[in-house]
Amino acid sequence: MTFLELAKAAMPGATDAEVDYALWNHTPFPFDPSPRTLFKKLSGYHRACANGRQLCETCSRIAVAGKWNCQWCLDALANSASQ
Ligand SMILES: [Zn+2]
């Protein structure tokens, strides 16, 4: 099974561009290319999108509505900026 076949199984109905985006932005690929980790991360991303949720661009937690990051990352960025 290739990476693309695994990703298509984790994200049924997704286009190649959607799979490519999720693979590079919401998985530890290529640093942890284990099939189990990739399938778990990709299916989680696909499930979040299907439920109308956006994932944090930094850590892949659920993002705050209208923001690119989750509350944890927003707090960390605010704390680092104030120091
Ligand atoms: Zn985050």
Image (cartoon, rainbow, N blue to C red):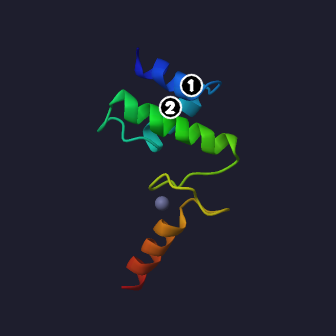
Question: Quick check: 50 left or right of 83?
Answer: right
Three-letter code, disc 1:
Asp
On whether ligand 1 comes within 8 Å of the CB at mark 2, the answer is no
Question: Quick check: 80 left or right of 43?
Answer: left
Q: Position of residue 44 (x, y in %)?
A: 54, 41
Q: Residue furthest left?
A: 31
At horizontal 47% and vertical 39% (from top left) the residue drawn is 41
Question: Quick check: 35 left or right of 48?
Answer: left
Most foreground residue, 18 or 60: 60
Residue 16 vertical placement versus 83 (above, below): above
Q: Quadrant of residue 65?
A: bottom right
Residue 54 vertical placement versus 13 (above, below): below
Q: Which residue is mark 2?
A: 20
At horizontal 29% and vertical 38% (from top left) the residue drawn is 31
Q: Which residue is mark 1?
A: 16
Per the rendering, the mark at residue 34 is none
Three-letter code, disc 2:
Asp
Tell me if label 2 and label 1 are in contact, CB under 8 Å: yes
Dot 2 falls on a residue whose secondary structure is helix
At horizontal 53% and vertical 28% (from top left) the residue drawn is 10
* Quarter containing the C terminus: bottom left
* Quarter containing the N terminus: top left
